[in-house]
Amino acid sequence: MVILDGKKLSNDIKNEITEVVSGMKDRGEKVPHLAAVLVGNDGASLTYVGSKVRACERIGFESTLIHLPETTTEEELLKQVRELNANDDIDGYIVQLPLPKQIDAQKVLMAVDPDKDVDGFHPTNFGKMSLEMETFVPATPAGIMEMLKRYKVDTQGKHVVVIGRSNIVGRPMSILLSKKGNPGNATVTLTHSRTQNLEEFTRSADIIVTALGVPEFLKASMIKDGAVIIDVGITRVVDEEATRGYVLKGDVDYDAVKEKASFITPVPGGVGPMTIAMLLSNTLLARKRRS
């Protein structure tokens, strides 16, 4: 069994980007500038955005954090988005989700300039991804594809089961794994909450990508020997014995499943770090496009 170490891989990618940025500085070129818009004080969002800012500092990017109050109106946020679209100094930016209930997230994401949409959520970029054109691929799916590539996990002709159909992970994963290439060229089954007899699909799968958000949902009895397991889920589970009062759990019953898997991602330290690495990679691509 091989642990797919996202923390190590993400550090490798950050080091590679650092070298590119160093070269840009030596040539007197503008370095990439990533902005993040955070509305409110959601704990997970604060942690995630903070890690993005620190990552930018480490690799030599410029970064801007725009922290707006929980009471921000939809029009106020849209005004901020328009300002970022018009700001030539900003190469790419993200609007951190979730947003407060008074704001229509889809309306806001639609307002983002596709050329600065380093999250890859705009329909223009999603459509280009579907057509296998160069574009900004959503960071989590992009990170998983990079992980499969660097660990030389063969996906050609394999049966992949994706659990979860969100536009952020599940749907893009199904598209990317079925595209031409390796990783790619897989036969993909996209499952969801209405799928009947889910275990029939997972037991026949060579590769399982689960993005459900249900702690330890995938049991050892649901997979076949030698399956590749990619766990995207991460949930805080109360644990009074833990220092922080909680532990982080993925969608996979890790201790049991790892005994049958050929490759598996841990939680934490698997897919999560790769997400930030690929966001940085998208920002570098945005800067190169604007050169």
Image (cartoon, rainbow, N blue to C red):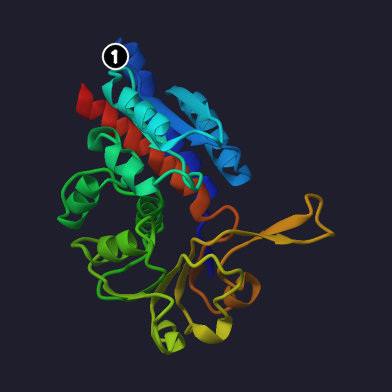
- Vertical side of 137 occupied by 116: above or below: above
Q: Quadrant of residue 285?
A: top left
Q: Quadrant of residue 83?
A: top left
Where is residue 37? Give x, y as percent: 45, 32
Whether residue 183 appears in this view of the structure is no
Q: Give the residue at the far top of this rendering.
A: 28
Q: Residue placed at 49% from the left, 54% from the top?
A: 271
Q: Amino acid at mark 1?
A: Glu
Left or right: residue 267 compared with residue 186: right
Label 1: element kind: loop
Residue receiving disc 1: 29
In percent of width and height, residue 48 lies at 55, 41
Closer-to-camera residue (190/2): 190
Is residue 236 among what the camera can see? yes
Q: Nearer the viewer, residue 157 or 30?
A: 30
Name the residue rendered at 46%, 27% in the picture. 59
Give how far across and how far down residue 196 sits, in percent. Answer: 40, 87
252 lies left or right of 82: right
19 or 224, which is in the foreground? 224
Residue at the spot 51% in from the left edge and 84% down from the top edge = 222
Give the left or right position of residue 208, taking residue 120 as reference.
right
